[in-house]
Image (cartoon, grey):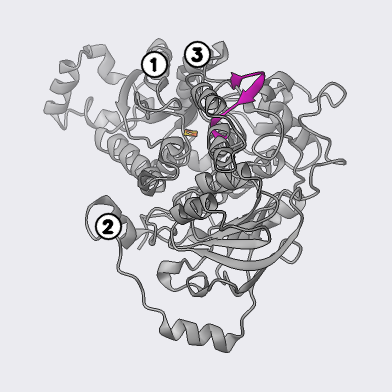
Amino acid sequence: MTELNRFSKTLTQEVTNPAAQAMLYGIGLKEEDLAKPQVGIASTGYEGNPCNMHLNGLSVYVKQGVTANNMVGLIFNTIGVSDGMTNGNDGMRYSLPSRDIIADSIETVVSAQWYDGVIAVVGCDKNMPGAVMAMARLDRPAIMVYGGTIRSGHYKGQKLDIVSAFEALGKKFANNISDEDFKGVIQNSIPGQGACGGMYTANTMAASIEAMGLSLPFSSSYPATHEGKQEECKKIGAAMKKLLELNLTPKDIITKKSLENALTVVMALGGSTNAALHYLAIARSAGLPLTLDDIQEISDRVPFIADLKPSGKYYMEDLLGIGGVPAVMKYLYSKGLIHGECLTVTGKTLAEDLAEAPDLNFENQKMVLPLETPIKPSGHIQIMYGNLTPNGAVAKITGKEGMTFDGEAKVCEHESEIITMLSKGEIKAGQVVVIRNSGPKGGPGMSEMLKPTSAVMGAGLGDKIALITDGRFSGGTHGFVVGHITPEAFDGGPIALVKDGDRITIDANTRQLTLHISDEEMAARKALWVQPAPLFTKGMLGRYIRTVKSASEGCVTDEA
Ligand code: FES
């Protein structure tokens, strides 16, 4: 076992730090334990969010599996922020920054404590990219365990999830729901533990990280309360042992090709636009080149085939019934869309893993369609450019809302304004609603727009207006939306210069976002523009404003 104990031996066998040895005895280890590999088990568990409430319990199962395989498992916690609970309020400013705090804190504990490997038990949107960024930085054997998707809620015969709650608000504005039913939806949308149940950001990241090779097969498919989730946790110890024996590290697993596999699964499943942001960041943490244009290239060749929420009919819990993510990947691999030679945390190639996966049956299910008859022949994530977004933006175009939108700008200086405008009937069909000052620096924290977009849907305007922003969208967002506009308004990007009534065209065919004013008018407006003072100069958000890169650079915070 000594050769497995590459890092922690500094604290133990070589007796370079007797205090460390004494402390290890102090936490209850025996002499024979000191020669064993030490595995950090990073949990983002906390009580205040359904996505995270069960993760500390799952970590105990993980520890049992680690101990059973003659290693020392040491649980530690890092933070989490609930996107569902922060959407639409100032707490959302902390959501994206929480990804980097998670990455920093896992890097810090594993490096400082000299753990030989790390297992991250994670559940909510930012937990997963944060954990994977840390794994890439650390490059020690690592496995991610997803806490699992939530089961659907039910009210009056309808299946519900978190988006149902937001859309109920829009229905309330439009007087389309009774007080009793509004309360019924709110009280029954979330039946217990697990991450938000559609192909929203958490399930998108879980599925694609499994495709990238950093989770065991089916990790993204078992719901939080499924018995398979506990079984997975108990199997992790054996998998970690094998990774240590093989010295197989994240940089062996995270490669340009495995990033392409991850993004291929995002496109096929109709995943969240946040995946673009997070994979740009994960690639940078791994020292790999990945650009918005690479993401577009994958979108160009991978059809959107899964009828999952938010734009579709089915929930993530339903996917397990047709073979889960492994069955989808096996199908994509059979069609030449997945690189099978990539290594995974099983210690095998992805092709070897997929050989054991079930087959998709197109006769008995309509949830995942054949590539020949897709929902959309290319990916729904489209990278936009144009005079409104010279450095790129990320659009979600499923095709269900059409491919072009042309309308007059209605400017909101803050996302909260759209709720007020909606309640006063000031948002009209045909408008392009511009929500600015929501970027990584200007927000700060690049807030998600789930509350505005859900309220728009609930008000019956979902297919009648478009929404563009330098903020982000929740994975739960659907409709004609363009986000991640760069440069952001805080940096003087053209989005800062839009005025009410300007004509804007979103063309998903040419991938151009155009503000119909002359170059001279644009220059004249820019000459009058004054950069706003940062909303925060101290504390975490003050530091975030000073360190965060643009959305087109993944909003990373650890680069000069
Ligand atoms: Fe955690 Fe939605 S709030 S996944």
Which residues are the magenta region? 152-163
**491 relative to 340, above or below:** below
The three-letter code of the residue at mark 2 reads Gly
Q: Nearer the viewer, mark 1 or mark 2?
A: 2
CB within 8 Å, label 1 to label 3: no
> How many neighbours does mark 1 have within 10 angstroms: few (below 14), some (14-19), or many (20 or more)?
some
Query: Looking at the image, is mark 1 or mark 3 earlier in the sequence?
Result: 1
Q: In which quarter of the image is the C terminus?
A: bottom left
* Magenta run includes residue 157: yes
**Depicted 340 relative to depicted 447: above or below:** above
Q: Mark 1 points at which residue?
A: 57
Q: Position of residue 354 (x, y in %)?
A: 70, 27
Would you call the spot at circle 2 few (<14 residues within 10 Å), some (14-19), or many (20 or more)? some
Q: How crowded is mark 3: few (under 14 residues within 10 Å), some or many (20 or more)?
A: some
Give amino acid for label 3.
Answer: Gln
Residue at x-position 46% and y-position 29%: 123
Q: Quadrant of residue 85?
A: top left
Compared to residue 108, the image places residue 542 above or below, namely: below
Q: Which mark is residue 230?
A: 3
Picture coordinates of residue 436 (x, y %)?
47, 63
Measured as percent of width and height from the top left, residue 256 is found at 60, 50
The residues bearing labels 1 and 2 have C-alpha atoms spaced at a distance of: 35 Å
Q: Is mark 3 on a helix, strand or loop?
A: helix
Q: Is residue 542 located in the magenta-colored stretch of the structure?
A: no
Residue under label 2:
542
